[in-house]
Amino acid sequence: MKIALYGKRFNDEHAGPVNKLVEAFLRRGISVMVHDKFYQFLLTKLSLPSNISTFSSHEELTGTNFLISVGGDGTLLDTASIIRDSRIPVLGVNTGRLGFLSNVSPENIEEAVEALVNGNYTIDSRSLIEVKSENQTFGDFPFALNEVAILNRERNSMVTIHAYINDSFMTTYWADGLIVATPTGSTAYSLSCGGPIVMPDSNNVVLTPIAPHNLNVRPFVLNNSSKVSLRAEGRTSEFLLTFDSKSYTITSDTTVELTCAPFRLNLVSLEGQNFFNTIRNKMGWGLDKRN
């Protein structure tokens, strides 16, 4: 078995659990390689064995069985651009705060490693959004696991966003912005703006306006086989396009096309982990003595 490790900076309190994670794999004779930037950070926190190798790009992940994300949900989102369409399963170890996607706690590391070795897990396949435009490119990985959002760069004025579904005019939003969220992203930015929670396997996307000027404009759910086209205009000619941790400047003559990506991200779910358990635990559902 071959394991890849990806992460970002963490607090000193998590150095012990991360060291435990590495040792748990090596003790079982499993090959471990660490993303080079994360490796340099780990050297300031841990004494790493000499038999650990490093990688810097997705091309070097051939033959990898799992990628372990060490950090919060933002770190796990970044793994999509590393594994790309390789379908390498990702397991998140949470050293962040909420940990909605990275839901393995540091105290459960040994059990998580044992589950991977023994095959006691299921794969949760998550859809992504592909971002395109005829007159602009968005890096070498124009995909979003959580959401795509168009925002006004000046917070003191609204942005007007014209939305089309499969080239048919849908509506015009007057708002601070518009979010197009995947089911994964339905529990993130979209939820904080009043959007619905969508089951991960529902094959939907959610259009959620941010502080809309017209209060009768509500979030809208559509099938992810649809093409969503967006064009923004306002008092300025430049707007902010964000997806996951990336951001780009677009202009009023840019039409952004959003479609379902031709591949999915595979998340590892361990025994006892499912969507409803995560919702209850992370969002405090049922914290009532009547339950």
Image (spheres, grey):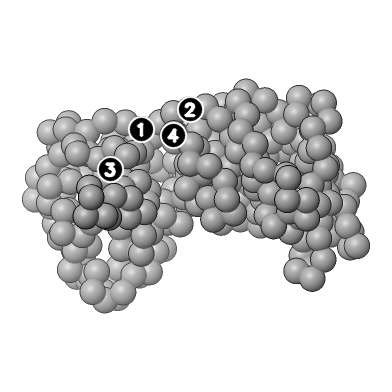
Tell whether label 2 touches label 3 (CB within 8 Å): no
Looking at this rendering, what residue extends furthest in the left direction? 27
Measured along the vertical axis of the image, is residue 291 above or below residue 170?
Answer: below
Q: CA distance from mark 3 to mark 4?
A: 13 Å
Figure quadrant of residue 271: top left
| Label 2 Cα crowd, 10 Å radius (few <14 / some 14-19 / many 20+) | few
Residue under label 2: 202
Where does the image place residue 116, in percent across and percent down from the top left?
A: 19, 38
Q: Residue at x 26, y 55 (%)?
A: 288
Where does the image place residue 182, in percent across and percent down from the top left?
A: 54, 39
The circle drawn on residue 200 is 4
* Camera-nearest label, 1 or 2: 2
**Dot 2: element:** loop
Residue under label 3: 277
Q: Residue at x 72, y 33 (%)?
A: 228
Measured along the vertical axis of the image, is residue 100 above or below residue 46?
Answer: above
